[in-house]
Each structure stands twice: as C-alpha cells, then as structure tokens.
C-alpha cells in the first residue's frame, strides 16, 4: 500500500518535471526567435538611418567642394 503511494507520487513528480522541462525548452526557443526578430528589425532600422546620414554627408561634402571651387577657381 505504501509502495503504491510512493509509486504514484513518483510518477506524478516525474510527469510534472518532464512537462516543466518541455515548457522551459519551448520558452527558451521562442525567446530566441523573438530576440532575433527584434534584432533584425533594429538592424534594418539603423542601417537605413546610417544610409540617410551618409547620403546627407556626401551631399554636404559635394556642396562644399562646389562652393570651394567657385571661390578658388578649382
């Protein structure tokens, strides 16, 4: 009788532990997927902003070179 109770308790603890392990594994995987999506989104955003800044700086540089050539007859 006592051994049956321990056997049932052991089976219950084992199944709960197994379910917890599966839940933790799936949560970890899903967290990594979400983190990668957010990282990719941020990477694209910052790459776009960086390209806009580069274009603005190139435009400003070309304008400055043109003004310099007007003043100094380059």
Image: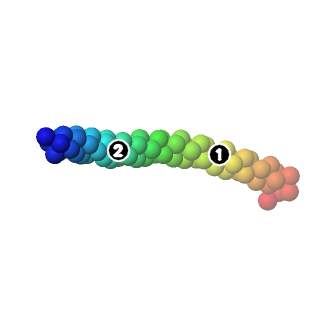
**Residue pictured at 26% horizontal, 43% vertical:** 13
Q: Is residue 33 left or right of residue 6?
A: right
Circle 2 residue: 24
Mark 1–mark 2 CB contact (< 8 Å)? no
- Of the 4 image quadrants, the one containing the N terminus is top left
Q: Is residue 32 visible?
A: yes
Q: How is the image coloured?
A: rainbow
Label 1's element? helix
- Closer to the chain start, of discs 1 and 2, is 2
**Residue pictured at 35% horizontal, 44% vertical:** 24
For the image, the number of numbered tags is 2
Outermost residue to the right = 71
The correct choice, above or below, for 19 with respect to 71 in the image is above
Callout 1 environment at 10 Å: few (<14), some (14 to 19), or many (20+)?
Answer: few
Where's residue 14, x and y in %?
24, 46
**Residue pictured at 72% horizontal, 51% vertical:** 61
**Residue pictured at 54% horizontal, 47% vertical:** 47
Callout 2 environment at 10 Å: few (<14), some (14 to 19), or many (20+)?
Answer: few
Can you tell which of label 1 and label 2 is closer to the viewer?
2
Outermost residue to the bottom = 74
The correct choice, above or below, for 16 with respect to 58 in the image is above
Where's residue 59, x and y in %?
68, 46
Where's residue 31, x and y in %?
40, 43
Where's residue 30, x and y in %?
36, 42
Q: Is residue 63 left or right of residue 34?
A: right
Label 2's element? helix
In the foreground, 56 or 22: 22
Circle 1 residue: 53
Q: Is residue 15 visible?
A: no
């Amino acid at each position: 009788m006592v051994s049956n109770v321990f056997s049932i308790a052991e089976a219950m603890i084992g199944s709960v532990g197994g379910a917890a392990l599966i839940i933790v594994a799936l949560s970890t995987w899903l967290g990594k997927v979400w983190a990668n999506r957010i990282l990719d989104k941020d990477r694209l955003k910052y790459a776009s902003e960086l390209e806009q800044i580069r274009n603005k700086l190139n435009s400003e540089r070309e304008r400055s070179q043109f003004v310099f050539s007007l003043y100094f007859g380059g």
